[in-house]
């Protein structure tokens, strides 16, 4: 779009020339996103606001100017006195963290925007984890690039890797973001043998290049997934040991009992038909439910362990929980956020015992609309310790008399909860809640901790029921905070950027998946849900699920309510798991004061900074936990696949690269097939989703089934290799 107000006239906004690198937008609302995208299309000279409104396709004038003003306040858009707008230029220097390092280049991540490419000659001695100042930022076809001006702060440089011995020469292949081998000088191996997992300290050579390493600790053989998990925990910096003062405090708390004074100060729900439902091996039971049918609809109680009663702000146990942020789950262990004396003891809602809880009490009409909610400090006595598999049998009508007898005290409550959950599920689908298929894997270990089976983790009717009821409680908590106008933590999932949606549509077109709904301006969650339904049950389902997930921003915590796109909810938080998530503990603390009648103005002063800091730290720790869990899962998967080398399986092409394809099996195991293993073929890569053999015309495309043979599995790296079945000879 050309500037149509003055011919050949350049607006004077200051800053660098129009071809300079502009700050990527951190816009959060749909209107802000499309305004930023429109300004990028319009170029660097600026555009009249009226023309910008047309270019952005926003019909509502008030909504447009509100979003433009918000972007101006954030410093992302400049608007002059004549109402011309342009993207704000980035200063010549920007702070970032080096997140990836190869032999010839690196990538740095600023606080906002895309990763920045750094040529090897411009790294200036920076290493992964370092905080750096970048300068000379320029645009490239594949993204921005820059030069390291200086290193502001060295990272911890805690790296793990696998020892590789070639005669007298020792090298370490690092895990994670360092993508080249480091030499280990003689006498610096720490006694490690070939294939061992090791903790290393990287060292610079005389030229300042990172080429060497010293072994600091030997975990053990990299052929064992359990050993690899130890290394992953260390590399990710996940705390495993509680400080003595935390354990001492936990021991004191564990001896606390529910007193008559506690009961007198709370809503007494001990006679209510309340029950928990969890997996059979769960010990940290932090949520229980109850439901009743009324003349006008339903009442639902979601009763959550009152962790904030035991974990007070500023105590050692609270400080440790803040640093951990979340419990971390591995195939062979759980690293809890709270000591087990709390998580599996005094806070766990064990059946037949009096427990202190924080309850979300909600009213729904017959259509499942939430018409009222309140939060109360309560005391409960769960009547049944439910198990998902047993409740699934009850719902399916296949339960034996022993299971029916067990659940008799809460059967009416359970039946009503299922009825309400079904209505809530239909409502969610109606408003556009996306049904993204889970690719979680269940790992079966033997008595020695070796993975002997892997299975996709399925979700039954009872799991879906509990999920719907928890979503309702989380929604109510967010509503309560907004109504009271108090600081809070929200679980936010922002709209996908227009650029990513365009890329997704291009991919779907090539996969012959109809996606007209996504090509209109600002597609809704419902539009994405329609596309997901379109491929459900087909060989393309997993691929489309994966690509839509990549299109979306990752869910995170924020002290601002920005909505949850995937759930199609304007208000959402995390209230239901304070035993294992610090954000839930945070909002319990705020809601507790609100329930006590504290003045919202006082709460703003007390929790304003806390809410923001907790959101930032919780988001960071969640990423740390997820990274560790996924890396460990790769190692356990490889350990299992090593026991099945040579077997033939049917998989689906799940990814395509210039050198080969990734194939995913029904078990969720994914392996790489090199193009070199297709004998007599000369493949041409289309750059995104397929390879075509120039000789035979054969096509390897995402979503296509392929017979493969398990050719190799490296536990230490989690890498699995397949080969095409027809080439086995």
Image (cartoon, rainbow, N blue to C red):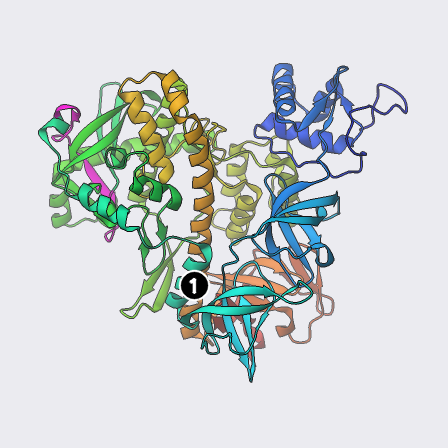
Tell which of 485 and 570 is nearer to you.
485
Residue 627 visible in the current orientation: yes
Query: Mark 1: few, some, or many residues within 10 Å (few <14, many ≥20)?
Result: many
Secondary structure of the residue carrying numbered label 1: helix
Tell which of 406 and 399 is nearer to you.
406
Tell which of 595 and 631 is nearer to you.
595
x then y, percent, for residue 330: 36, 57
Judged from this view, the residue extending furthest toward the front is 206
49 on left or right of 648: right
Tell which of 584 and 361 is nearer to you.
584
- Residue at 22% x, 27% y is 377
Q: From which residue to which does the magenta span run?
A: 264-285
162 on left or right of 48: left
Judged from this view, the residue extending furthest toward the right is 8
- For the C terminus, the quadrant is bottom right
- Residue at 9% x, 29% y is 260
x then y, percent, for residue 669: 46, 62
- Residue at 80% x, 38% y is 19
Verify whether residue 694 appears in magenta. Answer: no
Residue 667 visible in the current orientation: no
Q: Main secondary structure of the magenta part?
A: loop
From the viewer's perspective, is residue 557 above or below residue 125? Answer: above
446 on left or right of 99: left
- Residue at 51% x, 33% y is 526
Residue receiving disc 1 = 231
x then y, percent, for residue 417: 25, 33
Q: Quadrant of residue 1?
A: top right
From the viewer's perspective, is residue 27 above or below residue 366? Answer: below
83 on left or right of 412: right
């Amino acid at each position: 779009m050309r500037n149509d107000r003055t011919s050949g006239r350049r607006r004077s906004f200051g800053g660098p020339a129009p071809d300079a690198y502009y700050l990527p937008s951190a816009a959060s609302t749909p209107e802000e996103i499309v305004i930023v995208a429109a300004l990028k299309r319009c170029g660097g000279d600026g555009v009249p606001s009226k023309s910008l409104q047309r270019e952005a396709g926003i019909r509502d004038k008030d909504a447009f100017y509100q979003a433009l003003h918000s972007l101006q306040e954030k410093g992302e858009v400049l608007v002059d006195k004549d109402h011309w707008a342009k993207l704000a230029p980035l200063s010549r220097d920007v702070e970032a963290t080096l997140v990836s390092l190869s032999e010839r280049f690196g990538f740095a991540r600023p606080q906002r925007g895309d990763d920045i490419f750094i040529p090897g000659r411009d790294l200036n001695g920076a290493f992964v984890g370092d905080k750096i100042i970048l300068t000379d930022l320029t645009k490239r076809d594949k993204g921005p690039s820059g030069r390291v001006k200086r290193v502001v702060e060295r990272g911890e440089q805690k790296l793990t890797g696998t020892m590789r011995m070639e005669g007298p020469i020792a090298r370490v292949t690092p895990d994670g973001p360092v993508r080249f081998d480091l030499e280990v000088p003689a006498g610096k191996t720490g006694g490690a043998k070939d294939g061992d997992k090791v903790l290393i300290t990287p060292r610079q050579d005389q030229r300042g290049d990172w080429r060497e390493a010293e072994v600091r600790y030997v975990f053990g053989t990299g052929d064992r997934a359990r050993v690899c998990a130890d290394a992953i925990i260390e590399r990710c910096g996940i705390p495993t040991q509680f400080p003595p003062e935390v354990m001492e405090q936990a021991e004191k708390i564990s001896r606390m009992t529910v007193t008559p004074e506690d009961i007198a100060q709370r809503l007494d729900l001990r006679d209510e038909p309340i029950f928990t439902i969890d997996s059979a091996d769960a010990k940290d039971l932090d949520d229980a439910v109850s439901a009743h049918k009324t003349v006008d609809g339903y009442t639902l109680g979601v009763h959550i362990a009152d962790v904030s009663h035991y974990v007070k702000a500023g105590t050692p146990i609270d400080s440790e929980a803040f640093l951990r942020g979340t419990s971390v789950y591995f195939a062979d262990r759980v690293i809890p956020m709270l000591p087990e004396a709390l998580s599996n003891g005094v806070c766990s809602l064990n059946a037949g015992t009096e427990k202190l809880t924080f309850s979300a009490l909600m009213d729904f009409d017959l259509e499942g609309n939430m018409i009222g909610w309140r939060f109360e400090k309560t005391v409960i006595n769960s009547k049944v310790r439910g198990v998902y598999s047993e409740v699934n049998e009850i719902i399916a009508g296949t339960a034996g008399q022993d299971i029916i007898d067990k659940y008799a005290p809460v059967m009416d409550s359970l039946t009503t909860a299922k009825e309400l959950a079904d209505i809530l599920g239909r409502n969610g689908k109606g408003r556009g809640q996306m049904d993204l298929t889970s690719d979680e894997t269940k790992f079966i270990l033997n008595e020695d901790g070796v993975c002997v089976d892997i299975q996709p983790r399925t979700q039954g009717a009872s799991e879906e029921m509990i999920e719907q009821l928890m979503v309702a409680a989380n929604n109510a908590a967010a509503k309560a905070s907004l109504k009271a106008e108090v600081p809070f933590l929200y679980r936010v999932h922002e709209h996908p950027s227009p650029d990513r949606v365009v890329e997704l549509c291009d991919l779907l077109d090539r996969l012959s998946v109809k996606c007209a709904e996504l090509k209109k301006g600002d597609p809704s969650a419902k539009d994405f849900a329609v596309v997901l339904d379109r491929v459900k049950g087909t060989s393309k389902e997993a691929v489309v699920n994966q690509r839509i997930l990549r299109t979306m921003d990752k869910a995170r915590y924020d002290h601002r309510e920005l909505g949850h796109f995937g759930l199609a909810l304007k208000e959402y938080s995390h209230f239901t798991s304070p035993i294992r998530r610090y954000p839930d503990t945070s909002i319990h603390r705020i809601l507790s004061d609100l329930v006590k009648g504290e003045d919202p103005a006082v709460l703003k002063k007390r929790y304003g900074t806390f809410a923001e800091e907790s959101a930032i730290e919780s988001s960071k720790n969640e990423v740390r936990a997820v990274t560790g869990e996924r890396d460990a899962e790769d190692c356990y998967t490889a350990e299992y696949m090593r026991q099945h080398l040579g077997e033939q399986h049917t998989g689906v092409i799940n990814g395509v690269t210039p050198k080969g394809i990734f194939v995913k099996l029904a078990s969720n195991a994914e392996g790489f097939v090199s193009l070199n293993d297709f004998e007599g073929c000369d493949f041409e890569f289309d750059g995104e989703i397929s390879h075509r053999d120039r000789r035979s015309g054969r096509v390897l495309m995402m979503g296509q089934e392929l017979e493969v043979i398990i050719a190799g599995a490296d536990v230490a790296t989690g890498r699995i290799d397949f080969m095409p079945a027809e080439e086995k000879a």
